[in-house]
Image: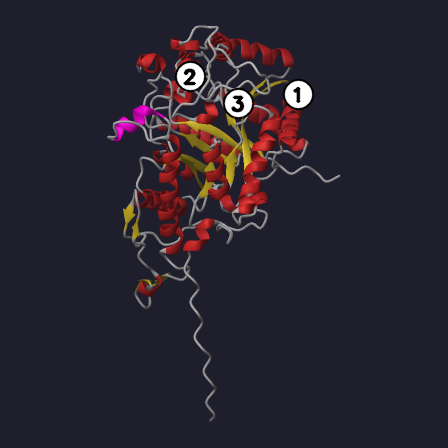
Amino acid sequence: MTDPRPLFFGLYEQANVGNGAASASLWRHPADERLQAMALPFWLNLARIAEESRFDLFFFGDVLGIYDTYQDSAETALRWGVELPAHDPLMHIPALAAVTEHLAFGATISTTYEHPFGHARRQSTLDHLTGGRLAWNIVTSYLPSAARNFGLPEMLEHDQRYEVAEEFMAAVYALWEGSWADDAFVGDKQSGTFANPDRVRAVNHQGTHFATAGPHVSPPSPQRTPVLIQAGASPRGREFGATHAEIVFAGWSSTEAVQRGLASIRTRADELGRAGSEIRSVAGANVVVGKTHAQALEKLESYQQWHSLPAQLAAWAGWSGFDLSKYSDDEPVVGKTNHTQSAAPTNGARERPLTAGDLRRRYAKVEGNSHLFIGDPDEVADQIGEYASLAGIDGFLLHQFIAPGSVEDFAELVVPKLVERGLFRDDPPTGTLRSRIRDDGADRLPEGHPAARYRQTPRAPAPELPLLSA
């Protein structure tokens, strides 16, 4: 029997106070420090903890609007600070990279409300500044308020957003992978040559949704294209992930569903000419750990005391598009919306659809929206290892109930137990982020990835001249 491979661990964060991914109202807890999240020291502290604990990734989720689906109003979201403030995570990364050496960073950026040229410029800049420690979580955005914020009368239809995203990817691949040849940057003081103009080309993308001339304004960065993360679980989202993603977020509700979802994505990737086995996967994790099982239960109960059902329903309404304020308890909640389809209510294999009452009872609990691991350090480490084995995933993104207490507890109590089991690295990660997740240790995307189609061919070497006789 082979030794287990260390899992990939990231810290999930958002540049906000009311982090709905765990519980949007726990910033009120006496031990929580999220009210300090509008100032830099809060984030520097979290980055140092993640770095010292040998986490692989510091991951930022993001939204571009206010959660105003619940009760057709922003009032609840504003009152409880649901995913507010929605600060720009890209502004955080340079500061956090400056106080870390190994920790990689991921940021959520929407293809619906960005332009490929500006996005490519910012990502190349960050990939240079971090030495290749950068990932991009590709999203198409799900909040109607975001559409209005960018001047649209309404949100684009779900599948149309993915059509826009496909064109966006073509444009940024052309900029990152095809505009500058590998030997274009010279940087030679003697000849006074910064770059060879013959090896830099324009892009001239003219599409349905975007146009950009190029050339790209940045020489190739360590990874060229940042590591690509994607979380879509709808049929269209899975197709997009199979086409582009290097890491997929396994947000399905059971280990069996995770296995099926990942298998479908990897099989489709094989059909598209990629190596599906190279696609990594992570799941969300909420961890409540104490030195004893009883202490862990006491912590969870203390979190429950500060949990707000209205705040969480406002968060879920934004994700799913279902406003439970309009449903009676016995009314089934069924159908599709134009929001995130993976957030729609499901009831596993049971035939009866979930009712509004079922969902209110679910979100009245502070157990979070990811898998809950709870107990003493050995129990939690065993639960994590068992879940990863059953689901066939490669790692986890840790969501915090209490900041920074949740990640401090995890680092102090759980990490040593995971190291003992071979499930957590016992040395700092090194190299680019892509080199850490690929079996071949490569910094660049493989030839089978669609981005590789945009690359310039290597320059042919000059022919050898015959030797002159004396």
- Examine the rendered structure and indicate whether residue 71 appears above or below residue 432: above
Q: Main secondary structure of the magenta part?
A: helix
Q: Which residue is mark 2?
A: 24
- Examine the rendered structure and indicate whether residue 185 appears above or below residue 140: below
Find the residue positioned furthest to the bottom: 470
What label does residue 285 carry, if any?
A: none
Of badges 1 and 2, nearer the viewer stands: 2
The residues bearing labels 2 and 3 have C-alpha atoms spaced at a distance of 14 Å
Residue 296, given in percent of the width and then of the height, sits at 59, 14
Residue type, label 3: Ser
Circle 2 packing at 10 Å, graded few (<14), some (14-19), many (20+), is: many
Circle 1 packing at 10 Å, graded few (<14), some (14-19), many (20+), is: some
Q: Which residue is mark 3?
A: 370
Circle 3 packing at 10 Å, graded few (<14), some (14-19), many (20+), is: some
Span colored in magenta: 143-150
Q: How is the image coloured?
A: secondary structure
Relative to 241, is 115 on the left or the right?
left
Whichever of callouts 1 and 2 sits on the residue coming sooner in the sequence is 2
Whichever of callouts 1 and 3 sits on the residue coming sooner in the sequence is 3
**Residue 74, image quadrant:** top left
Helix, strand or loop under label 1: helix
The residues bearing labels 1 and 2 have C-alpha atoms spaced at a distance of 27 Å
The residues bearing labels 1 and 3 have C-alpha atoms spaced at a distance of 18 Å
Nearer-the-camera pick, 458 or 49: 458
